[in-house]
Image (spheres, rainbow, N blue to C red):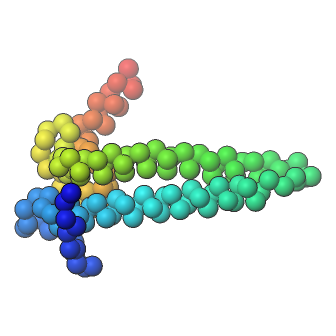
């Protein structure tokens, strides 16, 4: 089992240090874990809120409005459930030593991109190529 890396509170990954060194890896691991915890907390709050809202609303317009709100909330939670799966995959890549490298090219993904989107699996260039191919095939 790997020993936990000390990470200063004000640490930010920098381009002038070795890519995916222990500090960077720990920084992204903690960032992903905190994101996942936030999403799971929101899900628990939603479940509690839905349990509390099981009352009968006599007015049809009010009931329709509440049903629409509930459907939107559930759709949001479904998106977040998929996001949790991507976070878990990123944590698995960290554990396996593959985190931070583009799935297409094997090149490092920029630290700025990883900081903005820690679940990224493609470099910016590879992502743009992927999106262009999707647009071309979608237009067919």
Q: Is residue 46 left or right of residue 67?
A: left
Instruction: Decide which of 77, 131 is in the foreground and name it.
Output: 77
Locate the N terminus and report the quarter of the image it occupies.
bottom left
Q: Is residue 57 left or right of residue 122?
A: right
Q: State the image coordinates of residue 93 (x, y, percent, origin top left).
A: 25, 47
Spot the residue most to the front: 1
Q: On the image, which quarter does residue 132 sit in?
A: top left
Query: Which residue is drawn at the image coordinates 20% and 47% (left, top)?
Result: 96
Query: Which residue is drawn at the image coordinates 77% and 57% (left, top)?
Result: 53
Taking 61 as reference, is 18 above or below it? below
Q: State the image coordinates of residue 77 (x, y, percent, origin top left).
A: 56, 50
Instruction: Decide which of 64, 78 is in the foreground and name it.
Output: 78
Determine if residue 125 is in view: no
Query: Which residue is drawn at the image coordinates 63% and 57% (left, top)?
Result: 46
Query: Which residue is drawn at the image coordinates 69% and 50% (left, top)?
Result: 70
Q: Is residue 71 left or right of residue 42?
A: right
């Amino acid at each position: 089992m790997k020993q936990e890396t000390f990470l200063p509170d004000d640490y930010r990954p920098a381009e002038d240090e070795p890519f995916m060194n222990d500090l960077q890896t720990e920084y992204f691991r903690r960032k992903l874990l905190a994101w996942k915890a936030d999403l799971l907390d929101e899900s628990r709050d939603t479940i509690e809120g839905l349990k509390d809202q099981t009352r009968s609303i006599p007015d049809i317009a009010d009931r329709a409005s509440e049903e629409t709100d509930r459907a939107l909330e559930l759709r949001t939670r479904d998106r977040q459930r998929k996001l949790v799966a991507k976070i878990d995959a990123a944590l698995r890549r960290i554990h396996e030593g593959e985190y931070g490298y583009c799935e297409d090219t094997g090149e490092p993904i920029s630290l700025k991109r990883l900081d903005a989107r820690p679940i990224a699996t493609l470099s910016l260039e590879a992502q743009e190529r992927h999106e262009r191919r999707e647009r071309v095939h979608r237009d067919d």
